[in-house]
Amino acid sequence: MRAARLGPIVFLLAALCQCRGEPAPSLSPAAPPAPPAGAPAPVPVPSASPDSAPSEAPATAAAPSVSAAPPNAEVAEPALLSADGTPLPQTEERPSVTSPLFLRRMQRLADAILTGDVERARDTFFPLVAYAQVKDVQKPERDYRYRLMAHFERDVREYRKALGRDAGRAEFLGVSVPEERVQWMKPGKEGNRLGYFRVLRSRLRFRMPTGKEQSLELTSMISWRGEWYVVHLHGFD
């Protein structure tokens, strides 16, 4: 209907322009003027539509929580010798019970108890190179190997028996260390030439397959260069 009404008007305008020698007008939308030579091309502005409306900004992600490394994580043991092979000296740094190294040592000790395999827990025991510096005894290497280490091996196997035939299916829950009882042992206190931190009567905690929790005593740990090591697992003999 609208096109029918515009027809005569277009015809009259065309005829009038012919009489004047002018080109007939176009009813199409006018093209934008060309930019001057050398001018940058204009940046098109997108038309607004419901689909192109900006979405809400994403929520800021929460910061990751910081936790101790898994007990079995590959964490390098601290050096005991200098580059030239000289034993490194003792320090007065108090050990942590949440460090990745400590957690790994305790997991390995628990694995040794649950399997009866003492080799898994060798690096949890106080190092010989440290014992030779600390203890004021004759032939410290012999005392270390034939008394301390022998008793440690015995205690690991006895603890395995104490947990019963289902020990292999038990779950290690962790170790409870009474940090309020940590003491700095000055030279001469326990036949020692060097001082160290000592803590007594920690507890290794396990959950048995029945769901019952059972704990075993970790009699004594002492420090060397800021790390806890086992010296007596069960008793002081």
Image (cartoon, helix red, strand yellow):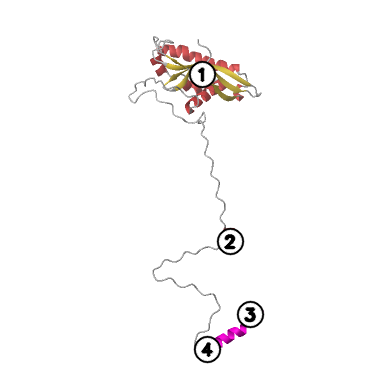
Decide: is 43 above or below 201.
below
Instruction: Check if mark 2's residue and mark 3's residue have beta carbons within 8 Å.
Output: no
Instruction: Check if mark 1's residue and mark 4's residue have beta carbons within 8 Å.
Output: no
**Residue 220 % position (x, y):** 50, 16
Q: Earlier in the sequence, mark 4 or mark 2?
A: 4
Q: Which type of secondary structure does the marked residue at label 3 adopt?
A: helix
Q: CA distance from mark 4 to mark 3?
A: 22 Å
Kind of residue at badge 1: Glu
**Residue 190 % position (x, y):** 44, 10
Tell me if mark 4 has few (under 14), some (14-19) or many (20+) residues whose alpha carbon lies within 10 angstroms of its own.
Answer: few
In the rendered structure, the answer to whether residue 191 lies left or right of residue 234 reads: left
Identify the residue under disc 3: 3
Could you say which is closer to the camera, residue 198 or residue 102? 198
Tell me if mark 3 has few (under 14), some (14-19) or many (20+) residues whose alpha carbon lies within 10 angstroms of its own.
Answer: few
The magenta stretch spans residue 123: no
Identify the residue under disc 1: 180
Identify the residue under disc 2: 49
Q: Earlier in the sequence, mark 1 or mark 3?
A: 3
> What range is drawn magenta here?
1-20
Residue 54, quarter of the rendered image: bottom right
Tell me if mark 2 has few (under 14), some (14-19) or many (20+) residues whose alpha carbon lies within 10 angstroms of its own.
Answer: few
Q: Earlier in the sequence, mark 4 or mark 3?
A: 3
Identify the residue under disc 4: 18
Q: Which type of secondary structure does the marked residue at label 1 adopt?
A: helix
In the rendered structure, the answer to whether residue 152 lies left or right of residue 82 reads: right
Q: CA distance from mark 4 to mark 2?
A: 44 Å
Kind of residue at badge 4: Gln
**Residue 115 % position (x, y):** 56, 22
Kind of residue at badge 3: Ala
**Residue 2 % position (x, y):** 65, 78
